Image: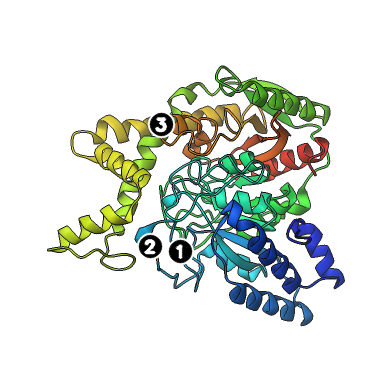
């Protein structure tokens, strides 16, 4: 059993500062956990003992020379959609099999500057398209809480690695809930920052107006530490926000006194699994006992969110994935002419879910349908954003479920993707509105399946959602 990789970042930093352990100790422990457990979990696509230990030794050298970088020596697993120089970046797709990144994403460069060790590539749904991590071209990831069930997606490998003791912390990406949903299914913390809070440079794009990079961790405090290291403006990403980065971890409160928490009535209605409802109702009580004032709010355009999201996301995916053509990098299948080569390469390289979304996105962008679908979806998106703006005039944060039900069985929704899409109802709205959200472990079902509670905050409201999550975590005994 691992002894160090199951600890939190804050616990490990204390031990490192005392000199009780080294970064190499942590990394070797994590590698041992992967070797022991990952054949069952399938959380990792790639890990290199040599690469990770070299980075750990460099971190130890830096510490011995007096370096006080905030995350010095802490290993972080990376979702296989972010470029890390010298490591593969396949996006869990055959079309990028064998590709090695030639540069660091900005989020990775910032973590390196903070002293983190980039330790392994986690499995995901191909090009981040899916909610189960069953759409990977290479393997299926399983939920550590019950290996007969999905870990969620698309960042399922990252969540499974953290929850299963194979990673101290991990990075994921969230386009419609792909950090928060797997965090909820696996029983860990998942933070989706506001759009533009973390640079997207070096992230292989799925839907450029929705994607955001964020941490998956064991505690809210750990998520705050990673966000603080990654956040900030970036000249390489014109959509990143040039705003000061607060000391998130140092500002975590001890109480919710004076905090108004909104309860969206549309998120607590019909269709919610009874056990999830019971956990959310208990979570509301915990927040009230911690000093929060509860107010009911309305997000009236919620019913249009799934349709709006899957028009916008697929349209942007169609445009973004056009670059994978076999010409410049990645896989290539020979053809009679360039067009034939292009078609054969994409046919062989993309999996069924990616093809489904590219076809749908191409359709809604096509002549005669653009106004009817894509333009109309953008107008509805504005209404959804205005719903949140009105709600946040009444409260600091919103509390809601993360998903309508706990983790389901492997293969259960493969034949009916619409049912999988409908499970995103409580998460896609945050991406459409560009706001922030966090999933925090809140309880277990009768079958011991984790259930998360979601706190949503306004754009650049990470301090509020981290604060609410931190107080809830402690009051509920989850830390």
Depth check: 254 or 183 in front? 183
Residue picked out by circle 3: 416
The x, y position of residue 344, in whole percent, is: 22, 57
Q: Quadrant of residue 474?
A: top right
Q: Is residue 12 above or below residue 278?
A: below
Disc 3 is placed on an element classified as: loop
User: From the viewer's perspective, is 424 left or right of 35?
Assistant: left
> Which of disc 3 and disc 1 is earlier in sequence?
1
Residue closest to the far top: 270
Q: Quadrant of residue 459?
A: top right
Question: Between tags 2 and 3, which lies in front?
Answer: 3
Q: Is residue 293 above or below residue 42?
A: above
Q: Quadrant of the C terminus?
A: top right
Q: Residues within 10 Å of mark 2 (few under 14, many from 20)?
A: many
Residue picked out by circle 2: 96
* Residue at 23% across, 33% down: 369
> Which of disc 1 and disc 2 is earlier in sequence?
1
Cβ–Cβ under 8 Å for marks 2 and 1: yes
Q: Residues within 10 Å of mark 1 (few under 14, many from 20)?
A: many
> Which of disc 3 and disc 2 is earlier in sequence?
2
User: From the viewer's perspective, is 204 left or right of 323?
Assistant: right
Q: Quadrant of residue 352?
A: top left
- Residue 151's mark? none
Distance Cα–Cα, label 1 vs label 3 = 29 Å
Disc 1 is placed on an element classified as: loop
- Residue 89's mark? 1
The x, y position of residue 107, in whole percent, is: 56, 62
Q: Residues within 10 Å of mark 3 (few under 14, many from 20)?
A: few
The x, y position of residue 288, in whole percent, is: 79, 26
- Residue 111 appears anywhere in the view: yes
């Amino acid at each position: 059993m691992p002894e160090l990789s199951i600890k939190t970042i804050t616990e490990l930093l204390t031990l490192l500062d005392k000199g009780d352990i080294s970064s190499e100790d942590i990394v070797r422990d994590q590698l041992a956990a992967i070797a022991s457990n990952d054949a069952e979990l399938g959380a990792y696509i790639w890990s290199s003992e040599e690469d990770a230990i070299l980075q750990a030794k460099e971190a130890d050298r830096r510490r011995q020379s007096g370096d006080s970088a905030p995350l010095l020596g802490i290993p972080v697993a990376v979702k296989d959609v972010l470029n890390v120089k010298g490591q593969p970046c396949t996006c869990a797709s055959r079309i990028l099999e064998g590709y090695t990144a030639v540069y660091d994403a900005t989020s990775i460069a910032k973590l390196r500057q903070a002293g983190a060790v980039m330790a392994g590539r986690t499995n995901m749904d191909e090009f981040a398209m899916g909610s189960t991590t069953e759409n990977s071209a290479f393997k299926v990831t399983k939920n550590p809480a019950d290996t007969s069930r999905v870990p969620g997606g698309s960042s399922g490998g990252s969540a499974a690695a953290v929850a299963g003791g194979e990673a101290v912390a991990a990075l994921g990406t969230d386009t419609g809930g792909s950090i928060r949903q797997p965090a909820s299914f696996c029983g860990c913390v998942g933070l989706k920052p506001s759009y533009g809070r973390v640079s997207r440079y070096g992230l292989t794009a799925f839907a450029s107006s929705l994607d955001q990079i964020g941490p998956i961790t064991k505690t809210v405090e750990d998520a705050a530490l990673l966000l603080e290291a990654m956040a900030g403006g970036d000249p390489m990403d014109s959509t990143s926000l040039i705003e000061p980065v607060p000391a998130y971890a140092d500002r975590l409160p001890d109480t919710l006194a004076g905090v108004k928490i909104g309860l969206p009535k549309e998120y607590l209605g019909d269709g919610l699994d009874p056990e999830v409802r019971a956990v959310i109702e208990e979570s509301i009580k915990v927040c009230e006992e911690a000093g929060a004032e509860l107010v009911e709010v309305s997000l009236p355009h919620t019913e249009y969110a799934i349709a709006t999201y899957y028009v916008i996301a697929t349209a942007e995916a169609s445009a973004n994935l056009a670059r994978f053509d076999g010409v410049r990098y990645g896989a290539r299948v020979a053809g009679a002419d360039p067009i034939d080569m292009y078609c054969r390469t994409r046919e062989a390289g993309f999996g069924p879910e990616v093809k489904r979304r590219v076809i749908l996105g191409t359709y809604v962008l096509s002549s005669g349908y653009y106004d009817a679908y894509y333009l109309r979806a953008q107008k509805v998106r504005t209404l959804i954003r205005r719903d949140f703006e009105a709600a946040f005039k009444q409260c600091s944060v919103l509390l809601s479920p993360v998903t309508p039900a706990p983790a389901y069985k492997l293969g259960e929704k493969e034949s009916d993707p619409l049912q999988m899409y409908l499970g995103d109802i409580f998460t896609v709205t945050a991406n459409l509105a560009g706001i922030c959200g966090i999933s925090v472990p809140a309880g277990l079902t009768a079958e011991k399946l984790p259930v998360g509670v979601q706190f949503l905050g306004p754009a650049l409201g990470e301090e509020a959602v981290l604060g609410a999550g931190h107080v809830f975590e402690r009051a509920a005994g989850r830390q």
